[in-house]
Structure formats: C-alpha cells, structure tokens
Amino acid sequence: MQTGSLIALTADGVTVLIEATAGRLPALAYWGEALPGLDAGQAEALVATAEPVTGSNDPEIRPRVALLPGHDTGWTGRPGLRGSFAGAGWSPAFLVTEILVDGAPAPAFHAGGAGRVEVRAVDDAGRLELRLVLELLPTGLLRARAAVRNLADQPYACEDLVLAFPVPAEAAEVLDFAGRHNQERVPVRAPFPVGTHLRENRKGRTGADSAYLLHAGTAGFGFEAGRIWAVHTAWSGNHTHYAEQVHSGERLLGGGELLLPGEIRLATGESYESPWLYGAYGDGLDEVARRFHRHLRARSPQVSAQRPVTINVWEAVYFDHDTDRLIDLAERAAAAGVERYVLDDGWFGSRRDDTSGLGDWVVSPEVWPGGLHPLVDRVRALGMQFGLWFEPEMVNPDSDVARAHPEWIMAARAAWPIESRTQQVLNLGIPEAYEHVKTQILAVLDEYAISYIKWDHNRDLIEAGTQTDRGRPGVHAQTLAFYRLLDEIRAAHPGLEIESCSSGGARVDLAVLERTDRVWVSDNIDPHDRQRMMRWSTQLVPPEYLGSHIASGRSHVTGRRHDLAFRAGTAIFGHLGIEWDLTEATAAETAELREWVTYFQRERDLLLGGDLVRMDGYPDRILVHGVVAPDRSRALFAMAITDSVLPDPAVRLRLRGLDPDGRYRIRPVLVGAEPAGLIAPQWWGADRSGRILTGAALARAGVACPRVHPDQVVLYRADLAND
C-alpha cells in the first residue's frame, strides 16, 4: 500500500498540484496559472503554507476538502458520495490503496506535463471500492471522474456521486446561463454565494436553460481579463452544477449526474461511473473558451473547418413534401453554391403533421411512391451531399410502433406521462426497443446515400420510467443507450456526420460532442437574437460546430424583418447554412446570397478555424467579436448594432488578439449590399483600402466606427502589411 504522493502537472500555462498523502483521497492543493520550478521542496512548502488557521468553533483538525468531499473529514458541505446499504454505511471513510501516474506507481513526488492520475481506495468497512481519475489535458483543461463498486453481499443504493474542484477566495463572482426554447444561453452573473448555488437539471437532456458552464472569477472579470475558474458536467441527461461556500470560507465548483430515486442500485460486484467533470482556468472568458475549443478541435475524428454550406428545407416547406418543389429548391440552392441539402421532418410513416407517425422510420409510400431516390439522386447529381432528419428517441401515440408496443413508452405508472408536442419518449433502455430503432435507421442509411443526419429530440423526459420494471427511473439508462446508438450507427457508417438538435439548442454538452459534429444553436434564427446566442454558445463550443443559418427575410419565430446583409453577416461566424424558401428570393437577393456563400467558402478556414475574440466595454446594443488566425497573420472582426444607431460621438472599435508589434492593414469588408444607413468614417478611404496600424494600436486605441441603422453588421479584415 502506498503511503502517498504529491503530483504536479503543468500544461498550456496551467498547473495543478495534487496532494494524496497519508492514505487520504486526493485534494487539489493548487489549480491555476502555471508555477515554474515546482520541485518536491516547493510542493511540500506550498501544501504546508496553504493550511488555514482553525476557527473558534471548528473541529480540532480542520476539514480537508478532497476531490470527492466526505463528511468523515469533518466537512459539513455537500458530500461527494451519497448512498447506503439499506440505511447503513452512509458516511464511508476511504483509505487509498494505489496511486498511478500515467499507468505507473506514483513516486513520493512527481512533476510532469499533461498526465493522468488514477487513485484506488476502499472504505473502512471494506464494502465499497472507489476509483478516481484526474487528468490534465494538453489544452490545460482539467477533468475528473469517479467510479464506485459494491464489494458487499447486499445491494448498495447510490444516490449521488459528484466531484468538486476548489477555487480561491478571490473568485468573488459566478457566471452561468439560463434560457428557454428560442432564447438559449442567457448569461446570469451574481456574487459568489454563501451556502450553495445549485443548478439541477431534471429534463433528461442538457436543457435550453442549462448552466452550460459555471464560472467563478475575480470581480468584474470579462472576455479579455480576470482570473476565472469554470466547470462543465459532460453529460446529456439529468445533471448538476454547483458553487458552494461554507462558513469557514472554502469555495468549491462541482458537478455530476443527477440520479433519480432508486436509479442506481449496485448488486455485488457492480459499479457506477460518474460523467467527466471538466475544469478550465484562464485569464478572461476568451482564454477559458479557447481551452474548450482546442479540446474539441483535437478530438478524433476531427471536424474540419472546410464545412459544407448547408440548406435545410424545413422553413421552406414544413410538412408539404412535394418532389418537384423540393427538387426546385435543390437546384436553386446548388446555383447559390450550397454543398449540402437536408430534408427535414415529414418524409416517413403517416407524418403529414406533428401529431402522427413519429417513431415509424420508414419512407412514406404515400408521399414518396418511388422512395427518396428521385430527390437524393438529383441532389447528388447537382454536386451536393444529402442529409435527413430523424428523431429516434421520440414517438407519437398515433404511430405503428406505439400501437404495437405501448410498453416501450417511458412512464412511471400505468398511465403515460403528460404529452409534450404530441410526443412521448421511446425507452431505448429496453433492448427490443433499442434494436427496433437501430434497425430502422440503418435500413434507411443502407438504402440511400446519406452523408448527414439532423438528430432531433423535442421534449423533456418527464416521469421517465421503465414500464416493464415497475416504473423504475430510466433516464440514466436512456442516456447511455443514446450514446451507444450514436456509436453503433457511426461505426456502421464511418463517414456519416450527425447534428445534435433538441428543440434547438437543448442538447449541447461535451459528452454529446464526442459523438456528433454539429449542434443546432436554436430554432430561432432571427439574427437579432442569434447575435447574442452565438456570442455565448462559443463559450464552450467552437464556431465550426455551431449550426448558423441565413434566415428568411421575415423571421418565422419573431416576425421581425431583416436585411440579407445582417442575416448573412451574422451567420458566417458559424457553420453556414440557409433556412429560407429560395423561391421567394428576388433576383437581386439571389445574387447577393451567392456573394455571401462565395465569401464564406473563401474565408471558412479562418472563420471556422481561428481563435475566438470577444470585446468588452461596449453598450449592450453593440456587439464586437472576431476570429484571429493562429499565426496572427490575419483576422476578421464584426461589429453588430442591434437596437439603435450609434451614440454621438461614436465609440471606437478596439480590436484585440493580433500581434502587438505587427503592422496590420485594417479595412472594411463589404459583401453584397452595404449596411443600411451607412455613414463611413474617413479612415476607410474613398477606395475602402483602410489604414495601417499596429496590433497594439488596434487593441488599445481602436478606430472610429461608422454610423448604421439598427440591426446591421459591419465586417472588418486585418492583414499583416508587407509595406
């Protein structure tokens, strides 16, 4: 048995010091900006000098907060593990039996780069085995997960297994997100609480109102600066995020899966593993975001910045599937430069509206007597990929599958849950239901040349139990089955791309993004609202994953009208698509659309592969952001005005992220029609060639901005100057 170890890991400007001595569970003695020269003596001194003074009414030994906090140490905050053997063994005390670093036994002190630490422990009664894994990734992201195994001869009911990372006292403010359908990812900021700031999600999916990322940082932290620590629970089912401060001053950020009563009951030898809890440290929100971006960009298979421009025909036709009309749309899309065509809801079973047929994944002979071949063949002949919409986890009561197998509907009792969107949930935790769905989807994929699936999930999981098991909760099993289904479908069709859509952006998390290639930000593609949703969605997800479509002239969700330049200038900062009935476009609009598509195709390596920058210090109605090439040779910036004309005198645009010593030509980019109401500043020049300034001057002094009407966007390009 190892006596313990101090382990220092440093990667991409971040150091974590893990203290696992005297047989105790590991604790983070330090997590933050890289500490140079951290040898054994320095590590021991750092741990010793960090020991706080005991308070007047504290236990004689001050509680030590481990990665898995436990009451046995005197900790009175939220415990990491909650469960019992029929009421006994509810406060286990774990003793470490093994510590591994990158698979080898840990020495008394280890210093290295990115690495993996694995700790095994057994509780004092010998009834539970605990396995903790902590990794510092090359991106500087920290992640941890835990697994508990039952060694006893009686069942163990696991009620909660969450992990927590400590943050220092200067983390004075918290920032996470709220939202709803059509208004996803609304930032919410507040002082770090006394007690617990708990965000519980019981929707059975990530949720449009999920915490998304929970940040804690120094007062007033922004996009550019401020020490920030953040956590993200990588799980697509019920989950928690929390920030906690106890009376003695310790502050934690934590999270994990939210388990329903009786959901995890471990028989002898069985185990339960928590999802990954990710942690990010950075100076400013942009640095935190870029850590997650680099992590996703390093995944295998990679998502290329050369993403095909997509058209989805949902808002053009809805359920009216007429072959000639859909082929006409395909021809118009191809003429505009579109590279992928997606047929949305309504192609299967009796699905002529949203009340029938969902769950019967067979091409409708009524609407498509020759199958989808005429459309698929024409789309491919036009040089485009073909994509198709599915909603595999949902079912209409008026469907063949629901009539044949009512026991496959998730329910907590004999009566089904209340309906939402005329839907119930198909229980993929039942093997026969799982195989039925998988077989039907694979049959369609085997018959047609389909390159892309839009995978939807349009309702919360309410009373999501298994009828065949007395209504026992099934969200955990459903989530794992969803992951397995994605994995098996992709294994059968390795080149297939999948988009995660869930009433818009209600299933966006790192676990689903291990298996999908795109997320639908929101069903609301009104650019006025999308400006803010895109701005905050990029806090976790890089632009190439964000489905970002050019909307109809009049928004189908809000009813607002917008110029094509604003719709397109908003959409190009994600994976560009079109959600517009092109038969309604004028000749001038069609020509302008082609210009925007061509511009995106020319610049998508930068738009979808650059480093994100978002500017602080402007009124709410002015949003400034951009992408900078990794080598800092060029950048594209956008200034969006969402509510009123600029104030007089106008603000200056400060554009950061460039090499401070580099000399850049900064100039406006005008694609198609000019922004409405444009009055250009003199520095643009008569030929719009702009001026040359250093990166430092652009970041600190900035340039005068134009005047434009509300709901307009102005683009700028910065290139290293040769002269």
Image (spheres, grey):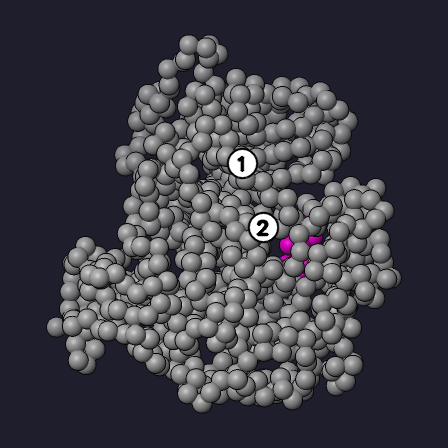
Q: Is residue 234 above or below residue 668?
A: above
Residue placed at 71% from the left, 67% from the top?
Answer: 354
Q: Quadrant of the C terminus?
A: bottom left
Q: Secondary structure at mark 1?
A: strand
* Quadrant hosting residue 570: bottom left
Please state if 227 lies on the left or on the right of 578 as rendered. Answer: left
Q: Earlier in the sequence, mark 1 or mark 2?
A: 1
Residue at numbered disc 1:
198
Residue placed at 55% from the left, 53% from the top?
Answer: 180
Amino acid carrying label 2: it is Thr
Q: Nearer the viewer, residue 698 or 490?
A: 698
Residue placed at 40% from the left, 78% from the top?
Answer: 596
* Neighbour tally class for label 1: few under 14, some 14-19, many 20 plus, Cα within 10 Å: some
Task: List x then y, in percent, for residue 55.
Answer: 41, 13
Q: Nearer the viewer, residue 537 or 417?
A: 417
Residue at numbered disc 2:
206
Q: Which residues are magenta?
A: 480-488
